[in-house]
Image (spheres, coloured by chain):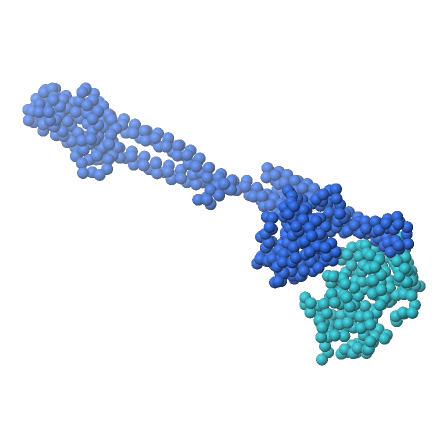
Amino acid sequence: MSYRRTKRDRVLVVDDDASLAEMLTIVLEGEGLTTGVCRSGDRVMAAFAQFKPDVVLLDLMLPGLDGMSVCRQIREKSAVPIIMLTAKADTPDVVAGLEAGADDYITKPFKNTELVARVRARLRRSDQLVEPLVFGEIVLDPTGHTVTRKGEPLELTPLEFDLLACLLSDPAQVFTREILLQKVWGYHHPGDTKLVNVHMTRLRSKIEDDAEDPQIIRTVRGVGYQAISPT
Amino acid sequence: MRSISGIWRRSIQARVVTSTIVLSTLVIGLTGWALLRDVASGLADSRRVAAISEARSGFDYAQTQLDAAVETEPATQSQTLTQMVDSLTSSRGAKRTYELVLEGPLSSTDGQVPVRSSAAITPDSLPDDLAKAVKAKPGTYWRYSDLSLLGGSGRDASVVVGSQLRAPGTGDTYALFYLFSMADQQATLDLVRRALLLGGFAMVLMVGGVAWLVSRQVLDPIRMARRIAERYAGGNLEQRMHVSGEDDIARLSTSFNQMAASLQTQIRRLENLSRLQQRFVSDVSHELRTPLTTVQMASAVLYDARDKFDPQTSRSTELLKGELDRFEELLSDLLDLSRFDAGAAKLELDAIDLTQIARDAADDALLSRKGIKVTVIGVETPAVVEADIRRIDRIVRNLLTNAAKYSGSDRVEIEVAQSPECVSLAVRDFGVGLSGDENLRVFDRFWRADPARTQGGTGLGLAIAREDAALHGGTLTAWGRPGEGAEFILTIPKPEGSSKVPAIVSVYA
């Protein structure tokens, strides 16, 4: 998949609350985005295939099929960025949603500016990588956003690609979770370490042979993460 | 001593056994004493009867002898008397159980009464009153006395029988005394006494043992009930007593179990109720969030377009937005408090430097916007504690906001100090201060210093701040004096430390 800057970006709003869904479309359309609305969990995949969104805004509490299952269904077919809407920031639901494949989450109630910033952050691809990066067995190609390991292509979401690119681009640096949040998620989100932790776990499960014994990215206890230079 | 009195106070069994032993000792002692007295008097009586009859036959014999010697010379009379005493003491049986004393003639001219006796008997073996009675009138008299021989060591109980003899020729009178030893009776009595003592002692021991056994039989189930009640009180609501049989203990167990079951039901019901209540508050807060989001988004759209409205609509939009923000704040605060009340608030601990927090908070835009001068004291050396940075930051910002909003002071002091136990952070203003019990009431939910003035805010900030501090095992206290200012002191314990003695003592303390 490639990034379409020329066209208007498309956001699929999945929310059962009619007013909130409509309000979301008003705000996003006002920002120059094209929106589509799906009101039920079991109709998401049809809407997804038809609408072909660049970002999905997904409410966790849905009739029909719950947000978590929807998230997993979308992930099976696509690497499209998913932002969850949740009323409970402190529940295991958030972690479960992130583990199901969501890239980011927003807690209700939120400000319009925050919503727009998050959506924009998911649409904007990090441009810190201009040339293909070769890191041991791993090759990152920024033009097609593809990653290969030992020549085999790896299925990474755009966010995972950015996370990996950020870490591999400077193996000398230990990236704190705060810095990763800023560089990869594109906003300041103080203290929200679960976002980084969950995605790092998923990234490792895709790139490492053994996620328990990482050979590419190591955890620096109490600080953050660092790429292990290939020898 | 204390341990003995402690056992006495705490152990029913000790009390039961001890009092049983004391009482049974008393009863057995009294019975034994009465028994012993009866036995002793019985023995003495039979001995006395035998003694008196034996003595009488002796007196008759002696009188006969005296009557027979009526014609003899006075010189030979003395010899006759000695022979009489000898024959009286030797004539009967193999073993003699008495001694003899013959005094007389009593009416001797030189005042000296000659005494003949079968053995060397000490003079006090003969009771004086008996001697007098015998000497005064003819007849047979008896007394109990102690018999002791000269050169002997012991004194034996004895019965003394005396009688007057009269020599028909001379008219001389003599006093003849039989001293019967009661050593045999004494020995029997001693035997009985020893047997009674031993038996009594054994009986007391046995009664004590029985009391111990019986009290244990009653107390064991009670002790078990106590242990089970303690475990029940400790929170193990499933504890029940074992019921066997139909006796009182079984009924007690049944009653206890019924009580436990009904308490358990009540507690479960209340727990359920409180869980439902908390769940309801949480659900309400969450359910409110979706419509609130929509309304806020709409108001933001309106607010952004307010330049295009007429002045009244424009102002209304501003008010709408402002109050919606306040509403959101209130909802968020209420949700926080419901988490504290439900015990669901969790800490995300990190090593944080309170001096850093103080410096960051001092740079807060709100304070400079209001033209308030902030002085930071004691931030040269780091003061590190294990704490949740978001909560600590929230507390400090809340204190600063309060100082800026409500005190009317134009300067604020932030001071950080530490002791080996804890770190304290004080926020002090120089405004209206606190009066009376306000230093306690500021932490009440929805409390406001001046009910007439509501300058925004939820009225929950300090209540949440205090809960946040308590969650860290710390304290948040308020101090102040009317017209001088107020000081809030946050104290967070270091790891392994405590917040009991804050590192800062308020100037208003």
Residue A213, x across and y down, in percent: 71, 71
In the visual, does A50 lie left or right of B274? right
Q: Residue at x 22, y 22 (%)?
A: B140
Q: Is residue A135 above or below residue B445?
A: below
What residue occupies the far right of the structure in this picture?
A50
Rendered colour, chain B: blue
Count of residue discs: 0
Quarter residue B424 falls in: bottom right
Residue B340, x across and y down, in percent: 70, 50
The chain letter corresponding to cyan is: A
Q: Residue at x 84, y 68 (%)?
A: A124
Q: Residue at x 83, y 49 (%)?
A: B319
Residue B489, x across and y down, in percent: 63, 52
Quarter residue A144 falls in: bottom right
Q: Residue at x 77, y 63 (%)?
A: A188
* Image quarter in which the N terminus of chain A is found: bottom right
In the visual, does B144 lie left or right of A18? left
Residue B114 in sight from this viewpoint: yes
**Residue closer to the observer: B503 or B304:** B304
**Residue closer to the observer: B219 or A74:** A74
* Image quarter in which the C terminus of chain A is found: bottom right
